[in-house]
């Protein structure tokens, strides 16, 4: 019994000695990464945008680098395109550039420390279409023959009648910058196509900021150019300097992305209605679509009372397309 008891005590002593000599394992501690948020994307153009982020917490260590990263696929990382922005303040702004037009992008703020890289929430945006391309699209849609026949057949409004509306490009060789185009415009009742009630030349322009607008000109000896939309060369001997501008009647256009159309309108009460009894000024609103246009002219008295014009816009279906020559 003594030998057995001694052997057991020896084994227990060895076990205790071995256990007491083992080093305690260090606890596993996960390094803390920064916490940050991504800013709302703004100032979106065809090839750039403004974004940024805010550092909510640095984590364990100082932030070494920060900015935003982006891609055409979700969950972008710093392996994709990225900016490197100032470390001075908690919030930072990032200019994203070199983008493709009319494209969806995903963007996240990022922050790098010695512990690794952290990302903010993901936001997405879509770049704009280049305004010069929109400008040419609008002109191509405008060139053609239009008819309000279908609209006139479906309304009892006394002002909505069957009208033919023609627009075609003239003087295609007079400006090579791609910033100015000229159109001949002719409108007549369907019942009397040889007696148009409107003959004008439109000067359609785009400025350096991408704003699209027009100027409207009366034509001297307009009857000489009857049906000029069928033969634009008849205007070759006509000089723009001999035209008479309709002051205040210019129309400003903007692209409506959601509806995929152009909207145009005159400004305030500047388009005077010279020679129209009881009418002081006229306003014009229009929309330009790929296969139709709307036009709404309203006349107002000197006291700003609406005295002339239909209750809703004319709808002109496009029945023929004329070729449009663009530059640059």
Image (spheres, rainbow, N blue to C red):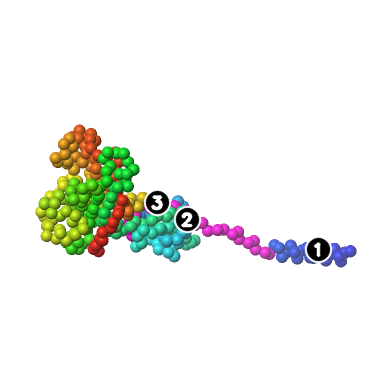
Q: Which mark is residue 259?
A: none
Q: Position of residue 37 (x, y in %)?
A: 44, 52
Secondary structure, mark 1, is helix
Q: CA distance from mark 1 to mark 3?
A: 73 Å
Per the image, the residue denoted by label 1 is: 9
Q: In the image, what residue occupies the spot 25% across and 50% down?
A: 164
Secondary structure, mark 3, is loop
Q: Position of residue 309 (x, y in %)?
A: 24, 39
Q: Position of residue 327 (x, y in %)?
A: 23, 63
Residue 167 is covered by the magenta coloring: no
- In primary-sequence order, the first of circles 3 and 2 is 2
Per the image, the residue denoted by label 3 is: 40
Q: Residue furthest front?
A: 191
Q: In the image, what residue occupies the spot 26% across and 40% down?
A: 159
Residue 36 is covered by the magenta coloring: yes
In this view, the mark in front (1 or 3): 3
Q: Residues within 10 Å of mark 2 (few under 14, many from 20)?
A: many
Residue 75 relative to residue 30: left or right: left
Q: Which residues make up the magenta segment?
A: 21-47
Q: Residues within 10 Å of mark 3 (few under 14, many from 20)?
A: some
- In primary-sequence order, the first of circles 1 and 3 is 1
Say which quadrant the N terminus sits in: bottom right
Per the image, the residue denoted by label 2 is: 34
- In primary-sequence order, the first of circles 1 and 2 is 1
In this view, the mark in front (3 or 2): 3
Total tally of numbered discs in the picture: 3
Q: Position of residue 108 (x, y in %)?
A: 43, 57
């Amino acid at each position: 019994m003594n030998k057995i008891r001694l052997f057991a005590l020896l084994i227990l002593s060895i076990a205790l000695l071995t256990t007491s000599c083992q080093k305690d394992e260090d606890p596993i501690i996960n390094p803390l990464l920064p916490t940050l948020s991504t800013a709302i994307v703004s100032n979106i153009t065809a090839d750039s945008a403004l974004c940024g982020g805010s550092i909510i917490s640095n984590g364990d260590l100082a932030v070494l680098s920060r900015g935003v990263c982006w891609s055409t696929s979700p969950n972008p990382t710093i392996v994709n395109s990225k900016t490197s922005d100032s470390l001075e303040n908690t919030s930072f702004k990032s200019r994203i550039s070199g983008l493709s037009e009319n494209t969806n992008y995903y963007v996240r703020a990022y922050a790098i420390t010695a512990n690794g890289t952290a990302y903010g929430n993901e936001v997405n945006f879509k770049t704009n279409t280049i305004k010069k391309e929109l400008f040419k699209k609008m002109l191509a849609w405008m060139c053609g023959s239009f008819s309000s026949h279908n609209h006139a057949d479906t309304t009892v409004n006394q002002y909505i009648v069957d009208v033919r509306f023609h627009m075609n490009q003239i003087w295609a060789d007079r400006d090579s910058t791609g910033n100015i185009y000229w159109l001949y415009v002719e409108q007549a009742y369907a019942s009397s196509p040889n007696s148009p009630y409107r003959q004008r030349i439109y000067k359609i322009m785009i400025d350096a900021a991408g704003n699209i607008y027009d100027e409207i000109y009366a034509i001297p000896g307009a009857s000489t150019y009857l049906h000029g939309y069928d033969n634009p060369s008849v205007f070759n001997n006509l000089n723009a300097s001999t035209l008479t501008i309709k002051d205040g009647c210019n129309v400003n256009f903007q692209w409506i992305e959601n509806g995929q159309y152009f909207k145009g309108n005159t400004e305030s009460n500047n388009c005077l209605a010279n020679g129209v009894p009881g009418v002081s000024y006229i306003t014009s609103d229009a929309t330009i679509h790929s296969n139709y246009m709307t036009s709404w002219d309203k006349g107002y008295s000197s006291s700003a009372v609406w005295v002339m014009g239909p209750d809703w816009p004319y709808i002109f279906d496009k029945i023929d397309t004329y070729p449009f020559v663009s530059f640059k």
